[in-house]
Image (tube, rainbow, N blue to C red):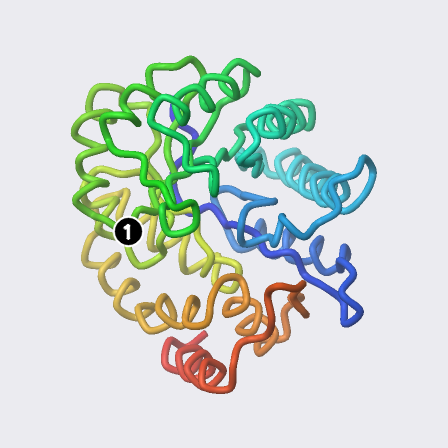
Amino acid sequence: MNIFRGAFTALITPMNSDGSVDFEGFRKNVKHQLEQGIDGLVPLGTTAETPTLDERPGEEEDKIISIVMEEVRAFEKSTGKKIPIILGAGSNNTKDAVHYVERAKAAGADAALVVTPYYNKPSKEGIYQHFAAVAKVGIPIIVYNIAGRTGLNIPTDLLARIAELPNIAGVKEASGSVSQMMDVIAQIKNKKPDFAVMSGDDSLTLPLVAAGGDGIISVVSNLAPKIMHELAQAALEGDFAKAREIHYRMLPFFKAAFVDGNPSSIKYAMNVKGMPAGALRLPLVEVNDEAKKIIEKAIKDCGL
C-alpha cells in the first residue's frame, strides 16, 4: 500500500540570531505541523539547508532527526494516525548517500529521499547505479528529480528502469514539466499503482493529482500545513471545485514562496507571521527588499 499520499512538508531548519540551530523552534514547528493535519514530514531536505548542517554523530542533523521521530511517534501513539517520515539522504557521493540512507533506516524513517547526484553529471548508467546502491540498504527510496538544482533531469525511460529496483517507492517530481509528470504516471505508476508520484512544486499540486499523482512535498506547508493538506485531500478525493478554489486562492503565495530563492523566501514569510524560522546560513542570505514586499503582499492577499 502506498503511504506516501497527500501533503508532506519539506521542513525548514529554524536558526537563532547567532546562526545556531533553534532546536526548540524546530520542535514547535513539528508540533504545529502535526496539529494542523499534515500528512507527512520530510526533514533534512534542501529546504532544511542540510548542506550547511553539522552531520557529525550527536550533532545538528542527529538532533533534528531525534526531535522529528520523538514528536511524530508521540503523536501517532496518542491519535492512532500514521505520519510517514521521509528523511533526506542525498549526496553526489554514492558512498555518502548509502550512509545517509542507512542512517534513515536506523532512525526508523519510513523512506529516504535521494536526489540525483549533482555536479558530477554522471551518465544514465551512473545515475542508475547510484540508485541501485542506495536501494540495497533495505528502506523505501523516494527518487528526487530536480534538474534545476542538480543539472541533470532523470528522463522517464531511466526512471522506469530505476523503478524496477527493489525498494524504489516513488519519485518527488520537480522537473517543472507537467508533461513529464504525466509520462511518469502513464509509463510507471499505471503499471505499478503503489509507486508514489509526488510533486516538488507547490503550484503543480492540483494538476499532478488531477493527472493521477499522489500529492506534494511542499515548501508552502511550512507556513500553511492545514491549507496544503486540504488542497491535496480535495484533489485526491476528486473534489476539484474545492481544490481549484484553494489553488487559486494560494497561487500568489505559491509564487512568492520562491521569489528570492528557497528557503530564504519561506523563512521570511514565517518570520513575518511570528513562526520559528530566523536567519539563514551562508551562502544563503535574507531576501531582498523587493522580495519582502512581494511576500508580505501575498500573505495578505491569500489571507494567511
Q: Which residue is mark 1?
A: 176
Q: Is residue 143 left or right of residue 182?
A: right
Amino acid of disc 1: Gly
Name the quadrant of the N terminus: top left
Residue at 76% across, 65% down: 19
Name the spot of residue 14 as percent of width and height, x first. Answer: 68, 61
Residue 154: which quarter of the image?
top left
Label total for image: 1
The correct choice, above or below, for 3 with respect to 238 in the image is above
* Label 1 secondary element: loop
In percent of width and height, residue 161 lies at 30, 19
Measuring 23% from the left and 33% from the top, which residue is drawn there? 184
Horizontally, residue 28 falls left or right of residue 126, namely right
The answer to whether residue 86 is seen in the rendering is no
Quadrant holding the C terminus: bottom left
**Residue located 59% across and 65% down the image:** 284
Q: Position of residue 92 (x, y in %)?
A: 53, 35
Picture quadrant where residue 252 is located: bottom left
58 left or right, relative to 70: right
Whether 238 is drawn above or below 263: the answer is: above
Establish if 186 lies above or below 224: above
